[in-house]
Amino acid sequence: MIMPEVEVKEAERFMVESLVAAGAPLTEAKAHADLLLHADTVGHFSHGLNRLELYINDIQSGVCNGNAKPVILKETVATAWVDGCEGLGATVGNFCMNLAIEKARECGVGWVAVKRCNHYGMAGYWALKAEKEGLIGMSFTNSAAIMVPTRAKKSANGTNPIAMAAPATGGDSIVVDMATTTAAMGKVEVQICKGEPIPEGWALGPNGKTTTDPQVAFDTGRLLPLGGFEKTSGYKGFGLSAMVEVFCSGLSGSRATHNVPLWTYNQTEAPNLGQCFVAIDPGCFAPGFEERIADCLQHWRNMEPVDPSLPVLAPGDKEKNNAKATTARGTITYPQAQLDSYKRMAESIGVRPLEVYVQ
Amino acid sequence: MIMPEVEVKEAERFMVESLVAAGAPLTEAKAHADLLLHADTVGHFSHGLNRLELYINDIQSGVCNGNAKPVILKETVATAWVDGCEGLGATVGNFCMNLAIEKARECGVGWVAVKRCNHYGMAGYWALKAEKEGLIGMSFTNSAAIMVPTRAKKSANGTNPIAMAAPATGGDSIVVDMATTTAAMGKVEVQICKGEPIPEGWALGPNGKTTTDPQVAFDTGRLLPLGGFEKTSGYKGFGLSAMVEVFCSGLSGSRATHNVPLWTYNQTEAPNLGQCFVAIDPGCFAPGFEERIADCLQHWRNMEPVDPSLPVLAPGDKEKNNAKATTARGTITYPQAQLDSYKRMAESIGVRPLEVYVQ
């Protein structure tokens, strides 16, 4: 199947113009487009253009305030409690991570928890923001309940992702960015499109038993925590999602994950997500941090693989390789159905449609 | 099989006297016994009396200095870099977690990384130390390479555990304490004793393929990361172990996990582990933290289970239930073979052997 390509610059233009048309100020629209473009660039298409329409809809319906400015409610030299004021994901993310970075520069650690947030895209984008400044970055968010706690019949937790990025010498890095479920719902959707089953351990069906039918998994909305079943330690993934909940709704006073509404086009109230942004300055610890991280990366990458055609990847390598390929190509590939849908949206908000790249 | 019981007080007496006989000062011996006793009390027997002999051997062989006092090498109001000086696990753990707690009380966060450590028992014990003070506690350690990175043939990472504990109202708490492998090697040993296979996704055999034979898994020493295979997101468990490595050897300058020697009775050099201790004061964030954590706990525990005989447990409930049962009984159950082995040790170091409880 040949999929249409769109120039990166053109995808950016379209995202920015659409967000502005919906009511976001230009600077915030640009920041948010950068966040979405990052996801498409590193190959996590579920979090890129794919979600633009939901963000647009959030602004139009008023659950997201494109003009909001976050407010610090309480702070120390190392911490801050912030009200996100229902701003755009990138507006709140940039405010909070900049604050965490500032605090890390001052005392070694910045720990910022924020309530009244909207969706903030890939968690890893925020961790990388600190990593680019030579710091360790971390970011966490809660989300709507589509994870089944171990032994439970229904969902109660979000995919509650954990992201951590650490700099190594030569511009290299370790990047961890993971939902605490075994698989994100986007991966289930990919299997639906392919017409292929999902592995056991990804999701439960309506009877509380595992299903390998991606459509059943999608309709039921009960993803298993990382680890899968109890015998393969699924309770660890549940524990990790609980930890994220402590950092997000626990510290910020946002809505708890079991009360967060699903992200749909019929949203009537703000999701009031909780998020957490952390920066740590390795300069406050043992000298030679970046060299040690580089040594780990080199060790892992040089290991003998089980299958010679599948080299061992360090955490974050897959996304780095995808980003290199995207930059070399200068284009991003989107499914035709997505482009058709965005053509309709473009017309309805009065923005020039995405132009498909012709070689 | 009837297993002999030992009174908790008697187990403690034996641990303290053995550590003192090996050369540890009484206060440090008591602290270390408390750490081991905690593991046996909550039902994680692999990390309790089971390991006393290894700790004793470490002191006798000189790789652990029972009299060492950790030293702060660098600090800010929120951070500290510490030299563990090859002290006992409990000595270094108490020093570092107390420091993290002090800093959290002062500025909201305390982040302490320490090099030249020995094994420090259950990671969760250290997180709970902060939790008991009304703080969020976290603790991480690296360890010998028995985890296979995704796609690799051999091991490169430790089980690199993550622990987090957060207080709720009424003395309740969320406690996460997990190896970043699917299963700890102790669980493989349990299957050997039972003569039962291990599930697929726990470990690889020498050919780089999954094995269900626990003896093969034990001898090969290649545990899969949490998530298991690549298709069930084993790279996430690998990513988590890498994150722990960043906090431990990365920040502290200790030995990297791929260079840490296996913990045996033939240790000739200090392991130089890296550890990390974190405390966060919820008082610096939104009021009502403990109420929100209690609400999550209640929500999870009240969920309908798939199997009515297996109620949904919140993270840490299993250990809390075990601890209650141990306290009610007043005794801990140990395998006869372990008591026989400790009888020989007691004779060789001149300590009164463990007395078995007779009703």
Image: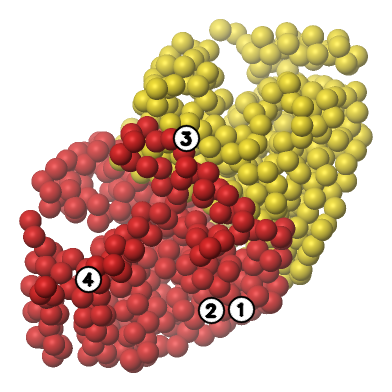
Chain colours: A yellow, B red
Mark sitting on residue B331:
4
Alpha carbon separation for disc pair 4 and 3: 36 Å
Asked whether, in this view, residue B303 is left or right of residue A255, the answer is left
Mark sitting on residue B102:
1
Where is mark 3, residue-wise? A148
Nearest to viewer (mark 1 / mark 4): 4
Q: Residue at x 40, y 88 (%)?
A: B68
Residue A58 found in image quarter: top right
For badge 2, the amino acid type reads Asn
Asked whether, in this view, residue B101 is left or right of residue A82, the answer is left
> Answer yes or no: do the residues labelled 1 and 4 have beta carbons within 8 Å?
no
Alpha carbon separation for disc pair 2 and 4: 30 Å
Where is mark 2, residue-wise? B98
Residue B358 is at least partly visible in this image: yes
| Above or below, comparing residue B89 to residue A74 in the picture | below
Which of the two residues, B40 or A277, is positioned nearer the viewer here? B40
Quadrant that contains the N terminus of chain A:
top right
> Answer yes or no: do the residues labelled 2 and 1 have beta carbons within 8 Å?
yes
How packed is label 1: few (under 14 Cα within 10 Å), some, or many (20 or more)?
some
